[in-house]
Amino acid sequence: MKETAERWDANKKLMLGERGGKKINGFDLGNSPLSVTKEKVQGKRLFMSTTNGTKSLKKVQNVKYLFAMALPNRKAVAERIMSLNKKNVLILGSGWEGSYSLEDSLAAGALASYIKYNFNNEVNISNDELQASLALWNTWKNDILGCLKTATHGKRLTSLGDYDDDLKCCSELDCLDIVPTQFERGVIRAS
């Protein structure tokens, strides 16, 4: 990523990245959703590297359709998925350094729940992991922020500083119409 980014004009790019929840030295922005404003990013190519998400996206970059989802854009992503009328959908959470992540499972359950209960087609949940994610969503859907604060990553962020506003932002549901979509291998654009 850095090699590709170095070929771009400095005025036309932003480097975003974090390791362990902290902004990478020399990068323009970290991983805070509040720092990525329209004013800062409009007209720029964003190069992003994260502890977990980047690796997950690379693992599935060869699929025909790839969308990035968080709780704020759940509805938009669900509707895009269902508009494709595909028989099989893979929901992949990034986890934390190769391990389970409560917040990713919550998001997977939220997406599966929306698809299952808002479309008239028969949806079959085909594995135990997604069944568990649905159960987790049903347990925490009325206290999303509480779940994020309970998660080890939420606690990790809290130990690094004041991330309460970031956690609140991440707990908002269905408030964004943006569907980050892979348009070419390794390149995701808002659509």
Image (cartoon, helix red, strand yellow):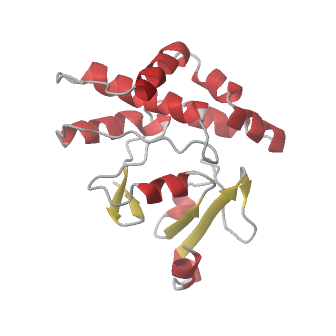
Q: Is residue 97 above or below residue 183?
A: above
Percent across and percent down for residue 180 are 39, 52
Q: Nearer the viewer, residue 43 or 85?
A: 85
Percent across and percent down for residue 107 are 48, 32
Percent across and percent down for residue 65 are 28, 52
Locate the C terminus by quadrant: bottom left
Whether residue 159 sits left or right of residue 4 in the image: it is: right
Whether residue 38 sits left or right of residue 62 in the image: it is: right
Percent across and percent down for residue 103 are 58, 33
Q: Residue at x 58, y 36 (%)?
A: 170
Q: Is residue 63 above or below residue 174?
A: below
Locate the N terminus by quadrant: bottom right
Q: How many marks?
A: 0
Q: Quadrant of residue 119?
A: top left
Q: Is residue 5 above or below residue 152?
A: below
Q: Residue at x 48, y 39 (%)?
A: 70
Q: Residue at x 81, y 44 (%)?
A: 160
Whether residue 145 sits left or right of residue 5 in the image: it is: right
Q: Residue at x 63, y 32 (%)?
A: 168
